[in-house]
Image (cartoon, rainbow, N blue to C red):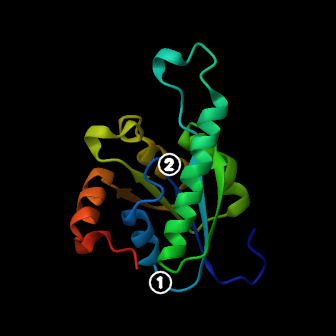
C-alpha cells in the first residue's frame, strides 16, 4: 500500500503463464527509476471440459504459486524488486480485487500471441482499459520464441 508522499510510480502487472517471460520483465525495467511493482498471477481456470466438476484446485493453486515465484525471480534478475500475489482465475476480477487497494499508476497485461491467447479472445486488455481508466500496456510474450532464442543465445532473451 502506498504511503502519503510516496512519489514512486506504482506498476501493476497481471500475467498468467507469461509472468516470468523476458518480455514482461524487460517492459517493466524499461520504465526506469524506482517503482513499487506488484505482480498478480491469476489462477489458471480449469479446462472447459472440467468446469462442471472439481478440477484439482490444489494443483492449479500450486502451479500459480510456482509461476508467481518464477516471475518475481525474473524481475529480480533484471534488478527489479517486485512483490506478488495470486488472483482470481478471471483476470479482470483479479484486477478488481487489487486495483482499489494498490492504486496503480499503470497496468501491464501480458498475454500469449493472438493465436494462443485466451485472454485476447476474451477481450481482457480492452475490458481492463475501459473498466479502470489506467494507462495500460499490453505485452505479448511468445514463450516458444524466448525458449528457442535462449537455447541459441540470442540477444532478445538476455534479462540482465
Question: For mark 2, does the 10 Å Cα neighbourhood hold few (<14), some (14 to 19), or many (20 or more) residues?
Answer: some
Q: Are marks 1 and 2 in contact (CB under 8 Å)?
A: no
Q: Which residue lies at the image location 58% right of the left edge and 55% below the top edge?
A: 68
Give the position of the N terminus as an image quadrant.
Answer: bottom right
The image's mark for residue 128 is 2
Secondary structure state at the residue bearing disc 1: loop
Circle 1 crowding by C-alpha within 10 Å: few under 14, some 14–19, many from 20: few
Looking at the image, can residue 15 be seen?
yes
Left or right: where 33 falls relative to 141? right
Q: Quadrant of residue 45?
A: top right
Instruction: Judge whether 4 appears above or below 25 on screen.
Output: below
What residue is shown at x 35% (from left), y 40% (from top)? 117
Please provide percent x and percent y for residue 53. Answer: 60, 14
Percent x, y for residue 29?
A: 45, 77
Query: Which residue is at the far front?
Result: 151
**What is the x, y in percent for residue 50?**
52, 17
Residue 57, located in which quarter of the rendered image? top right
Which residue appears at 28% of the width and 43% of the height? Answer: 114
Q: Which residue is depicted at the point 24% across and 57% down?
A: 148
- Compared with 32, 49 (above or below) is above
Res. 32 mark: 1
Above-or-below relation of 100 to 93: below
Amino acid at each position: 500500500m502506498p504511503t502519503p508522499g510516496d512519489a514512486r510510480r506504482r506498476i501493476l502487472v497481471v500475467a498468467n503463464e507469461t509472468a516470468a517471460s523476458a518480455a514482461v520483465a524487460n517492459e517493466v525495467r524499461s520504465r526506469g527509476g524506482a517503482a513499487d511493482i506488484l505482480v498478480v498471477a491469476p489462477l489458471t481456470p480449469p479446462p472447459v471440459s472440467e468446469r462442471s466438476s472439481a478440477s484439482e484446485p490444489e494443483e492449479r493453486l500450486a502451479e500459480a504459486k510456482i509461476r508467481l515465484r518464477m516471475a518475481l525471480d525474473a524481475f529480480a534478475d533484471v534488478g527489479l524488486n517486485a512483490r506478488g500475489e495470486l488472483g482470481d482465475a478471471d483476470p479482470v476480477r483479479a484486477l478488481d480485487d487489487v486495483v482499489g487497494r494498490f492504486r496503480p499508476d499503470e497496468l501491464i497485461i501480458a498475454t500469449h500471441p493472438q493465436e494462443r491467447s485466451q485472454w485476447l479472445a476474451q477481450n481482457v486488455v480492452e475490458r481492463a482499459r475501459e473498466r479502470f481508466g489506467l494507462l495500460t500496456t499490453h505485452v505479448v510474450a511468445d514463450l516458444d520464441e524466448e525458449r528457442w532464442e535462449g537455447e541459441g543465445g540470442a540477444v532478445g532473451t538476455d534479462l540482465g
